[in-house]
Amino acid sequence: MDAHSALSLLEAGLNQCAVVIDRDGGLLLALLTAGLVGGTTHCAGMCGPFVLAQVTARLEQVPASRMSEFHRLAGAAVLPYHLGRGTTYALIGAVAASVAGHVGALPGLKWVSVALLAFAALFFLAYAVKGVSAWLPKFDGAFQRWWGERVSRWARPLFGNPTGWRGYGLGLALGFIPCGLLYGAVAVAAASGSALTGALGMLAFTLGTIPSLLAVGIAGHLAGRTWRTAVARAAPAIMVVNAGVLGWMAWRMIVT
């Protein structure tokens, strides 16, 4: 493939992404804000230990004579890990949306996307309104614990030197750890029925979770707790708005 063909392919891909953003901007924004709020109130506590372990291991690889503010910030960012995690989430979103799209296209099954959006709306509402969570199914079964333990065991060897491809691989592996917030995000992505929208939506969700994990990586859990306290004040309102947007999208699917 020559340079001109590569540029043409890149331009076509960017144009397609622009179409998706214009068409499904509300869904993508809902996932971005869900990642921001959920990452602050949930992911920082759950995934924070993974980030801190990587930061410690990465900084141990830098000799004291070469340590600088750049090395400290680069080590705290753990960008390969976030890139790997985003890749896994995008893959899950693309597969879920593709399956839901094909199922929803079958006669009499248009309601699948509506049900997914309604479930996600209730899921996000549960983060804002106490008592709503009692209406939702629980995800703390034996299989979830078993799968989480297996994923952690597979990823453990990569913690020794989580840089470059090893950090990326660590993100790929840990992206499969069961997470309640992730289920809600995947439901939103799947409701789109488009593999590209599902992938972009989960990338938006990943992007939203990064600030809180970055705060933990830079200044530890204390900063993470401070950040969570500040954002938690606005979290209920944001999640209620998200639930409303998703509910409205589900209603539009019903009436059109």
Image: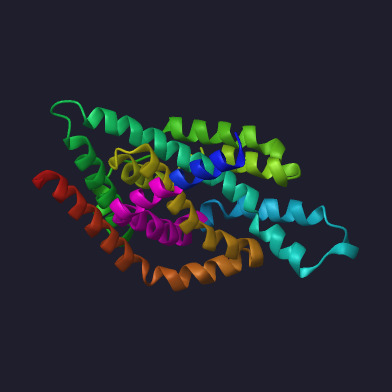
In the rendered image, residue 31 lying in the magenta stretch gets the answer yes
85 w.r.t. 157: above or below: below
Q: For this view, does 11 lie left or right of residue 234?
A: right
Residue at figure coordinates x 40%, y 57% from the top left: 32
Quadrant placement of the C terminus? top left
Q: Position of residue 36 (x, y in %)?
A: 44, 61
Choose top left, top right, bottom left or bottom right for residue 112: top left
Residue 94 in sight: yes
| Near-viewer residue (67 or 99) | 99
Q: Position of residue 182 (x, y in %)?
A: 42, 45
Q: For this view, does 109 lie left or right of residue 74?
A: left
In the rendered image, residue 93 lying in the magenta stretch gets the answer no
Identify the residue at the far left of this view. Answer: 255
Which residues fall within the magenta stretch?
14-43
114 w.r.t. 58: above or below: above
Quadrant placement of the N terminus? top right
Residue at figure coordinates x 19%, y 48% from the top left: 250
203 w.r.t. 94: above or below: below
Overall secondary structure of the magenta section? helix
| Colour mapping | rainbow
Residue 181 in sight: no
Q: Position of residue 40 (x, y in %)?
A: 47, 62
Identify the residue at the far right of this view. Answer: 65
Residue at figure coordinates x 75%, y 53% from the top left: 58
2 w.r.t. 239: above or below: above
Residue at figure coordinates x 37%, y 47% from the top left: 185
| Near-viewer residue (148 or 212) | 212
Q: Position of residue 89 (x, y in %)?
A: 47, 42
